[in-house]
Each structure stands twice: as C-alpha cells, then as structure tokens.
Amino acid sequence: MNTNPIGIFDSGIGGLTVANAVCSALPNEEIIYFGDTAHLPYGDKSAEAIQHYSTRISDFLLERNCKLVLIACNTASAAAYEVVKKHVGSKAPVLNVIDPVVEEVASNQSFHKVGIIGTKGTIKSQVYEHKLKKLRPDLDVTSLATALLASMIEAGFYNNSVSQAVINSYLNYPDFSDIEGIILACTHYPLIRKEVESFYHNRVSVFDSNEAVAKRVKQTLEQNDLLNDQKRNPHHFFVSDFTESFEQTTKIFFGSEIHLEHSRIWEE
C-alpha cells in the first residue's frame, strides 16, 4: 500500500480526459497533473525539445513524491517515452497512452484493417503503425492527420453541427472506407467518440486510450504493491502558463471545475 500520488502530464489540458479516467478507475488515488501550456502544442516541436520538456516535468512530479509517471500525451509518448523511462529509472514506473490501446487493438484477431486519426506530430511519427505492425504484421493500417479537431474541441465545438461537419469531412477519407476499427490517437478525441461512432453507424469499433490506460495504471500499481486503500488527499493541477481560458476549458476535459495552479517550472 502506498499513499503517494500518481503523476500525469500532457502538453496542455487535453490529458485531463486521461486523468479523469484514472480518477474514475482508482477513486482512492491522489492525482498530480501537469499541463505544459507554455509550450503547447507539442505537435510542431522537435523530438529533442519534447524530450527535454518531458524529462524536466518528470522531475517536477518526482520531486512531489509521485509513485508512477503517466505521459498523457500521444506526441510526448511517441517522442519521449523511452527517454523518460531511462531518466526516471527505478524511481517510479513510467507509462504512456499508446501501448495499452495498441495492445487492445492488436489482440482482436477479427480486424484486418484499422484507421488512426491524430495530430500531425503523432501521425508523422508513425508510432502507432510501427507498434501495431510489430504485434500484428498482417494488419492493414492507415492513418490521417486531423489537425483541426483538437483546437475545435478546446473551443467547445463537439456534439454539435460544427463538429459533425468537420468530423464527417475527415472520416470521408477514401482509405477509411473499409476499416473495421479506428483509433482516436489524441487525448482530446474521447469527447468526439460518440460522433465518430455515429458516422460509422456503429459498424466500426472505436478505440480511445482512456479506459485502456486507466486499466494499465491500476494493473501497474497492483503489481508493484502501490495501490492506496485509504482516503485520498486532494488532487493538484499545475500548468506552466496560466490564463483564465485554460481554467475555463478544463471542465470540458475533466468533467468538473478544477483549480489550476501556475508553476513557473521553466523559470527555475
């Protein structure tokens, strides 16, 4: 049993969807969340820059005694997971948001072709394709960068006519016409999951990382005897650059109002 918090970080506040899923699966656990809003989006940054940001944020979380570090960002998971894992060493387990959903999709032998939508950075990295092909060499994988979706969701446009038009435009991509599953490879996208399912009339299986990642966090804590069975401490949510709009937007991703604390991590 371990009462220390779980550390979660993202390039911004979209990773709060993952944090929310972890909180739902593990209600006794305290969360410390860090959104690197000073550098968002990570999608147009170099791998070296993302690795630098990610290792420094990991140190920030470890300094607050986090017992597990979760990279709740697809771009950072693609560019920095191995670097962060090596940097953290034996201090805490390190997880990413890609492997759990890849393993879930690859384990379904009925799939012959799957699609992936995500940010430019994630799609350009081809990390999902490489990991899926490693587990399932026979699987046909096609991907599409959907650059407008994250900013659209942050602006509050989801489950309405505007989002439906944008989503439909992307999903009409010809190479998606015969897919049997689609991966929502961005932590913003769980908010449009129902719209994606509706587009395909529930004929295509839709996957996002939230549930799979929450399960992996729980499994990892159990395996390392780190679960907390006592009443948790309050959650803490930090950002590296603060504006009122960030705090107002958090409700979209976390489902309830939260208070953001401004951490001047890059000025230290």
Image (cartoon, helix red, strand yellow):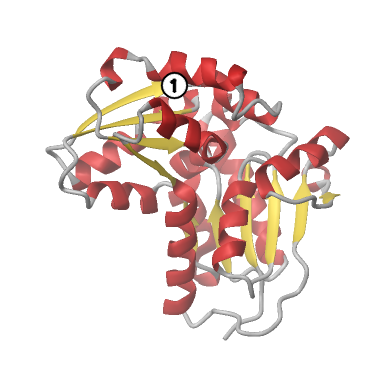
Instruction: Please state which amino acid type lies under the numbered disc 1.
Output: Ala
For the question of whether residue 127 can be seen, the reply is: yes
Q: Where 132 falls versus 33 (above or below)? A: above
Residue 146 percent across, percent down from the top left = 48, 21
Tag 1: Cα neighbours inside 10 Å, few (<14), some, or many (≥20)? some
Identify the residue at image location x=68%, y=30%: 154
Q: Where 54 falls versus 201 (above or below)? A: below
Residue 260 percent across, percent down from the top left = 82, 49
> What is the count of numbered marks?
1
Left or right: where does residue 265 sit relative to residue 9? right
Left or right: where does residue 111 sit relative to residue 126? left
Residue 245 percent across, percent down from the top left = 83, 33
Q: Where 88 falls versus 105 (above or below)? A: below
28 or 199: nearer the eye?
199
Q: Which residue is mark 1?
A: 145
Q: Secondary structure at mark 1?
A: strand
Residue 116 percent across, percent down from the top left = 36, 31
**Please, which residue is most extreme toward the right here?**
244
Identify the residue at image location x=55%, y=79%: 227
For the question of whether residue 122 can be seen, the reply is: no
Left or right: where does residue 56 sit relative to residue 115? right
170 or 267: nearer the eye?
170
Left or right: where does residue 142 sit relative to residue 156? left
Identify the residue at image location x=49%, y=51%: 210
- Quarter of the image with the N terminus is bottom right
Identify the residue at image location x=35%, y=15%: 173
168 or 27: nearer the eye?
168
**Please, which residue is most extreme toward the left here?**
138
